[in-house]
Image (cartoon, rainbow, N blue to C red):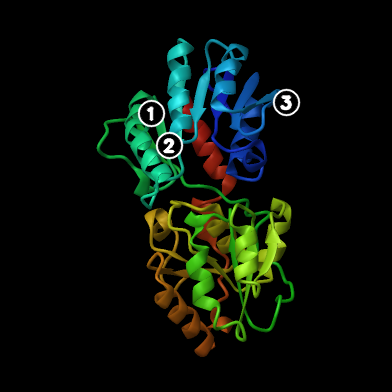
C-alpha cells in the first residue's frame, strides 16, 4: 500500500482494549500499524499505558485522555470511531493538534431508546456531538447507506464492514443437536434484543436449541431467567467459525446496529440469518435467499417464523450456496483496503 500523508495516527475509541482486539477495530489497526511510524489508541476503561510494537494503548477515563494528549504527536491523522463523546474528543484533539486531519468512521446509529434520566441525557449529548463531529471531520466513512447524515454537507464514503472469508467458511461438522439449532452472538445488553428472542422460543425448547455467545451486564440475569439456553460467554474470534457451523440459523435480534459483523460471519459460514429490519440489515439480507427480516421487538412475528421453519421442514433447505457476493462486496481485506485508499485521497 502507498502510505498516507501522515506519519502517525491517533485512533479514538469508546471501547476497551479487549473489545477493540476482538472486533473489526483490530483489523483496521493491523493495517494502520504497518503503514505509519506510530499508532496511538485511545481506549476507554481501566487506566494504563501499554506498548506493543509501534502501537501505544492509552486506556482510561476522559480525564486520563486529556492527560495523555501530551504523549501524542503534534501533527497526525486522527481516526474517530463514533459521533458521540469519543468523536467530540477527537474534534478537541484536531483543534489542539494543528495541521492534523480528522476522519470519522461511523459504524453505529448511536440510538438511545427509553425515557430514563441517563438515556435522556445521552440523547441530549448526541444532539450536540453528532453535528459537531461530522462538520469538523475532513472525511466520513459510513458502514451502511442507512447511516448517512444527509442533512449535513460533508465528504463521505460508504464502506461496508468486512469478514475474513478464509476464517469464516462452511465447515463439515456435526450439528450440535438434532433440533433446529439457533445461535445469537454479541454483547449481552438491552439493545441486543435478546429479551424478545427468549420469549419467542421459550415454549419451543422441545424443537429448538438456542445458544448464546457473548457476555455483558445482563448475562447472569438471562442465565437465571432462561436456563434452557446454552451460554458460551465470550469466545475467542478464532473459535467462532466452528461454533457457528454447528448451528442452523443465526438470530440477530439487535435493533441498534447498522452492519453487524456477526451477520456477515454467519453468512460466510453458509448459515441463514434472521434479523431485525433496521438500518443496514436490508443491505445484506435478501428475503428468503439468505435470511429473513422481522420487525424489531415483535415476539409473535419471530415466533411464527421459527415455527414455520420447523413445521415445514425448512431446516434441510437452509443451506446456502458459496456466497461469492460476500467475497466481492464484504471481504475483509477488500474493505480495509478501501478504507485505507479513502484516507489517501
Q: Residues within 10 Å of mark 1 (few under 14, many from 20)?
A: many
Instruction: Check disc 3 and report the residue beneath it.
Output: 50
Q: Residue at x 55, y 44 (%)?
A: 334
Task: Count the labels in the image.
Answer: 3
Q: Earlier in the sequence, mark 2 or mark 3?
A: 3
Q: Position of residue 45 (x, y in %)?
A: 62, 34
Q: Residue at x 73, y 57 (%)?
A: 239
344 left or right of 2?
left
Most extreme residue toward the front is 117
Q: Residues within 10 Å of mark 3 (few under 14, many from 20)?
A: few
Look at the picture and state if 138 lies above or below 186: above
Q: Earlier in the sequence, mark 1 or mark 3?
A: 3
On residue 133, the disc is: 1
Look at the picture and state if 28 lies above or below 115: above
Disc 3, SS: strand
**Residue nearest the viewer, comparing 268 with 39:** 39
Disc 2, SS: strand
**Residue nearest the viewer, comparing 131 with 105:** 131
Q: Residue at x 54, y 83 (%)?
A: 203
Front disc: 1 or 2: 1
Most extreme residue toward the left is 151
The quadrant of the picture occupied by the N terminus is top right
**Residue nearest the viewer, comparing 52 with 68:** 68
Front disc: 2 or 3: 3
Q: Residue at x 40, y 54 (%)?
A: 280
Q: Distance between the Cα atoms at labels 2 and 3?
A: 28 Å
Instruction: Check disc 2 and report the residue beneath it.
Output: 141
Q: Quadrant of residue 301?
A: bottom left
Amino acid at each position: 500500500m502507498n502510505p498516507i500523508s501522515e506519519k502517525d495516527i491517533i485512533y479514538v475509541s469508546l471501547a476497551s482494549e479487549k473489545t477493540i482486539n476482538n472486533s473489526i477495530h483490530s483489523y483496521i489497526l493491523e493495517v494502520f500499524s504497518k503503514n505509519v511510524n506510530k499508532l496511538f489508541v485511545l481506549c476507554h476503561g481501566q487506566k494504563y499505558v501499554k506498548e506493543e510494537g509501534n502501537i501505544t494503548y492509552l486506556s482510561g477515563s476522559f480525564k486520563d485522555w486529556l492527560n495523555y494528549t501530551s504523549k501524542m504527536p503534534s501533527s497526525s491523522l486522527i481516526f474517530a470511531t463514533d459521533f458521540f463523546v469519543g468523536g467530540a474528543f477527537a474534534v478537541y484533539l484536531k483543534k489542539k493538534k494543528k495541521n492534523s486531519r480528522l476522519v470519522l468512521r461511523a459504524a453505529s446509529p448511536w440510538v438511545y431508546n427509553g425515557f430514563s434520566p441517563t438515556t435522556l441525557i445521552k440523547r441530549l449529548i448526541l444532539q450536540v456531538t453528532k453535528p459537531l463531529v461530522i462538520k469538523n471531520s475532513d472525511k466520513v466513512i459510513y458502514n451502511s447507506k442507512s447511516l448517512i447524515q444527509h442533512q449535513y454537507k460533508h465528504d463521505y464514503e460508504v464502506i461496508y464492514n468486512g469478514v475474513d472469508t478464509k476464517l469464516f467458511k462452511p465447515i463439515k461438522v456435526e450439528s450440535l443437536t438434532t433440533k433446529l439449532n439457533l445461535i445469537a452472538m454479541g454483547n449481552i445488553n438491552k439493545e441486543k434484543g435478546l429479551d424478545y428472542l427468549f420469549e419467542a422460543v421459550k415454549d419451543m425448547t422441545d424443537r429448538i436449541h438456542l445458544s448464546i455467545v457473548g457476555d455483558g451486564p445482563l448475562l447472569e440475569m438471562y442465565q437465571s431467567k432462561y436456563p434452557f439456553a446454552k451460554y458460551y460467554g465470550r469466545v475467542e474470534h478464532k473459535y467462532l467459525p466452528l461454533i457457528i457451523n454447528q448451528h442452523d440459523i443465526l438470530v440477530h435480534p439487535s435493533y441498534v446496529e447498522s452492519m453487524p459483523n456477526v451477520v456477515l460471519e454467519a453468512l460466510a459460514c453458509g448459515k441463514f440469518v434472521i434479523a431485525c429490519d433496521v438500518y443496514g440489515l436490508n443491505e445484506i439480507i435478501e428475503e428468503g435467499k439468505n435470511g429473513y427480516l422481522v420487525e424489531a421487538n415483535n415476539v409473535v412475528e419471530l415466533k411464527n417464523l421459527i415455527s414455520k421453519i420447523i413445521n415445514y421442514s425448512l431446516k434441510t433447505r437452509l443451506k446456502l450456496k458459496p456466497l461469492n457476493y460476500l467475497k466481492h462486496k464484504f471481504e475483509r481485506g477488500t474493505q480495509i483496503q478501501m478504507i485505507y485508499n479513502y484516507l489517501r485521497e
